[in-house]
Amino acid sequence: MRPTSGTISLLTGSLPEERPSLRRLAEVRWGLLVAALALVVLGLLTVHSASAEMKIDYLPRQAIFAGVGFLLMLIAFSIDHRVLLGLALPLYLLSLAALVAVLVVGIKAGGARSWLGFGNWRLQPSEFAKLATALLLARYLETANQRFLQLSQIAVACLIVAVPMGLIVVEPDFGGAAMFAPMLVGTLLVAGVRLRVMVAALLIACALGGLVWSFGLQPYQRDRVLTFLQPERDPLGKGYQLRQSKIAVGSGELVGKGYMQGTQSQLRFLPARHTDFIFAVLAEEWGFLGVAATLALYALYLFSGAQVAMRARDRAGIFLVVGLLSMTAVQVVYNTAMVVGLMPVTGIPLPFLSYGGSFMLYNFVATGIILGVDFRRFVNR
């Protein structure tokens, strides 16, 4: 009787070869997933602490968002990103239609009409638009095989990003619209842009910035910038938020005041403490060591994502990961700098920590897509 391969393996003392799918699963950037889940747990704890003295404890809702987001992450991971890229244009057009619908029948809150209402639940289409725009941008730039992009290619890429940005600006939500810029810049830099084009773009951006300041910003938005530059000009009005945030961060010192022991959050001195300023609550309760640990988790997430981009085998996958990571990185840097007064106050939440259903779902889906790109790097070349 002729021995089988399994019999030979047992006789020689060697183990049967593992299935390729299992080997590839072991090589996935688990640091990305671990960091994301750890940040979600930390966010749930902090949201509970920040909203404990409010009329509504936002923990149950945020926990539901996190659970649904985790399921969506698994679905996004299971779908080949090449399939999503094939659907990029329909998804992009659908996201634009949703943004237009917001302007017509959207729910207005906080001075912006940014949500579509479904009973007691709200959906923010701008978060869906981020994913759709990243997919279409990656699909388009995949076709550019030259070392440097042509001006026409750069113009088309800018147009892809500018359309949803413009619709979000009209809401008006300048913070949400601004997060499309890092996606564009990151992907263009990886695709290849000549130095003279970068210099020209910087000069144009400065000119546009002056025009936006003069004609595009609402009076309250100009006041936010002026208050950032001179907080003492209105300490009990527009500068109150930033002043209370600084007090919360500074009072945490080295090890913090303890969970749910922060005075600025528990005594309700700090506004928006469960959303845009949740980092100030964390800093007050856990101090410098807690802040350092949180930033280390973000660093692990971004570093693991960067490794996915560097070892991806298809161009579209690289551009897709870079676009998603660029937005996350800028959101982390801006939000943490905002709560300590290094950047003007605007509506830019902190990934995985700030309360918000649409934002939580976006972060989970983006994570699933990035993990999927890494898992299929030997398939999509």
Image: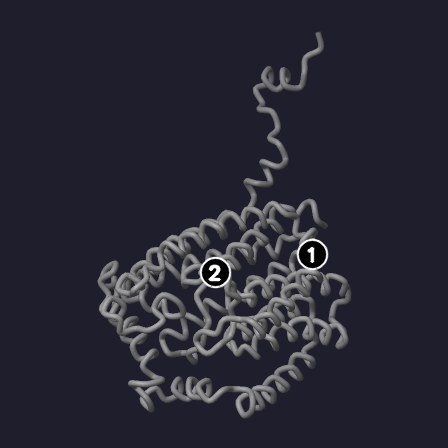
- The residue at 33%/91% (across/down) is 233
Return the residue nearer the eye: 158 or 121: 121
Return the residue nearer the eye: 291 or 88: 88
SS type, badge 2: loop
Kindly tell me whether residue 35 is visible in this rendering: no
Tell me which amino acid carries mark 1: Leu
Task: Give the answer, above or below, for where 178 lies relative to 61.
Answer: below
- Please provide percent x and percent y for residue 316: 69, 58
**Farthest residue toward the top?**
1
Task: Give the answer, above or below, for where 62 lies relative to 233.
Answer: above
Tell me which amino acid carries mark 2: Gly
The quadrant holding residue 39 is: bottom left
| Mark 2, residue position | 119
Give the quadrant of the N terminus: top right
Task: Give the answer, above or below, for where 104 lies relative to 323.
Answer: below
Residues packed near mark 1 inside 10 Å, few (<14), some (14 to 19) or many (20 plus): many
- The residue at 72%/65% (across/down) is 141
Mark 1 / mark 2, whichever is N-terminal: 1
The quadrant holding residue 87 is: bottom right
Q: Which mark is residue 85?
A: 1
Q: CA distance from mark 1 to mark 2?
A: 32 Å
- Please provide percent x and percent y for residue 324: 57, 62
SS type, badge 1: helix
